[in-house]
Each structure stands twice: as C-alpha cells, then as structure tokens.
Amino acid sequence: MSGTEVSAEQVGMLVLIGAPGAGKSTVGRRLANRLSLPFVDVDQLIEQTSGREIADIFATDGEATFRELERAATVAALAGSEEQVVSLGGGAPMTEAIAEALAPHHVVWLKVSPGAAADRVGLNVARPLLLGNVRSRLVSLLNARTPTYQRLADHVVETDDHGADDIVELIIEHRRELERR
Ligand SMILES: Nc1ncnc2c1ncn2[C@@H]1O[C@H](COP(=O)(O)OP(=O)(O)O)[C@@H](O)[C@H]1O
Ligand SMILES: O=C(O)C1=C[C@@H](OP(=O)(O)O)[C@@H](O)[C@H](O)C1
Ligand SMILES: [Mg+2]
C-alpha cells in the first residue's frame, strides 16, 4: 500500500503537531485519557525502542541519526489501523514521508508563540535543539516550520492563553462538530 492509500479498516487518528513546548506530549496524553483512546508519544517510543534518551542520540550520533529513528517510529505509529492519539516531535512534520503518512489522519496544530514556548520549556536540556538562547532558537525553528505546520493542519488551536485541559476540550468540541456534519 503506497503512503497515500488508506486501508478500508484504517480510521483517522488524532495527531498533534507543533513546535517544541506547544504541549503536544502533555495535551496528547490528557486527550487520550479523556477519549479513552491509546496514546503514542513518538519521542517516548523512540526512547523506549532505542533504550536511549533523545538528548543522548543527538549528542552521540547526531541529528541525522535521530531524524532517521524519528521517521521510522512516526511512520510506524501512523500506519496502525486503530483509532488513537499520536503526539509527534516538533521536527517530525518536516520529513516528506511523515507528511504523506499524516494524510489519512486528523492533524491538530498546537500553535504557540516563541515566548510562551520558551517560558514553558525553560532551560530543559532534554531538547538539544534549544540549547543556548532558547527563545531565539524557537523563533528560528518557528520561522522555518510554520508553513509546514499550517499546510498539514486540519485544526489549529492557539495555546498561548489556554491551559492544557482547556485545549483538550477545544479539540474534543471541534471533533464533535466534524462528526455532526
Ligand atoms: N497549554 C499549556 N499552558 C501552559 N503550560 C503548558 C501547556 N501545555 C504544556 N505545557 C507545559 O509546557 C511544557 C512542555 O510541554 P510538552 O507537552 O512537553 O510540549 P511538546 O511535547 O509540544 O514539546 C511542560 O512543562 C508542560 O507541562
Ligand atoms: O523540534 C524538534 O526538532 C524536536 C522536538 C522534540 O520533541 P517535542 O516537540 O515534543 O519537544 C524532540 O523530538 C527533539 O528534541 C527534536
Ligand atoms: Mg513532546
């Protein structure tokens, strides 16, 4: 089956994309609990299957190796047939194979300003790309990635002024509206 075909039994997953610090992991986990659906956080999947932390993969093998592990884990998570919530890593949608794998699913872009994201992630060393001046790194990441997030998103949620639980409800309400159509 090519990346663009959807098997008959495949149902759309709820997939969260957005910059680091947008809340994909936090909101994804709560959203899955609220909907009683399985949850896959691709970063966690990479760490579980490789037995290594992401920061260590970056430091020891470099970003290219991480992106290869991320591509394989993300495509595998999106290829399943059961309905679930999947939270991607911030850089995943930049890969063409992943953009294709997202096509059959409901993609929610958690939009966040560089300032809000910087406040949230702080000096968290778990995000190697943000080492140094976190805010300016986020500005450049967002400048490079926003067009892709925008292109892939079926639903955009502004997160700066909403708590994670509010965002969960906004996503659920939007999904209900789609089901009523
Ligand atoms: N809507 C929000 N408002 C305030 N803080 C948030 C929000 N969403 C997530 N956070 C916090 O921001 C940090 C990063 O969240 P995380 O879910 O890891 O983001 P991502 O997976 O998109 O990088 C965590 O400390 C989390 O508790
Ligand atoms: O933006 C990125 O390129 C990355 C974001 C991280 O995930 P979160 O977006 O969940 O922090 C993680 O995949 C890795 O540090 C790379
Ligand atoms: Mg995350």
Image (cartoon, rainbow, N blue to C red):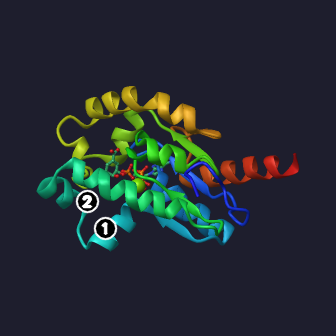
Position in image of residue 120 (x %, y %): 37, 46
Q: Position of residue 76 (x, y in %)?
A: 47, 63
For image coordinates 13% across by 54% down, the residue present is: 59
Q: Is residue 154 above or below residue 66?
A: above
Q: Secondary structure at mark 2?
A: helix
Secondary structure state at the residue bearing disc 1? helix
Determine which residue is flagged by label 2: 54
The residue that disc 1 covers is: 47
The residue depicted at 19 percent of the width and 53 percent of the height is: 58
Q: CA distance from mark 2 to mark 1?
A: 6 Å
Residue displayed at 47% across by 42% down? 18
Closer to the camera, 16 or 68? 68
Write the residue at 50% across / 63% down. Answer: 77
- 130 or 148: nearer the eye? 148
The residue carrying pointer 1 sits among few (fewer than 14), some (14 to 19) or many (20 or more) residues within 10 Å by Cα, namely: some
Q: Is residue 28 above or below residue 93?
A: below
Q: Amino acid at mark 2?
A: Ile
Q: Amino acid at mark 1?
A: Glu
Label 2 close to label 1 by CB (< 8 Å):
yes
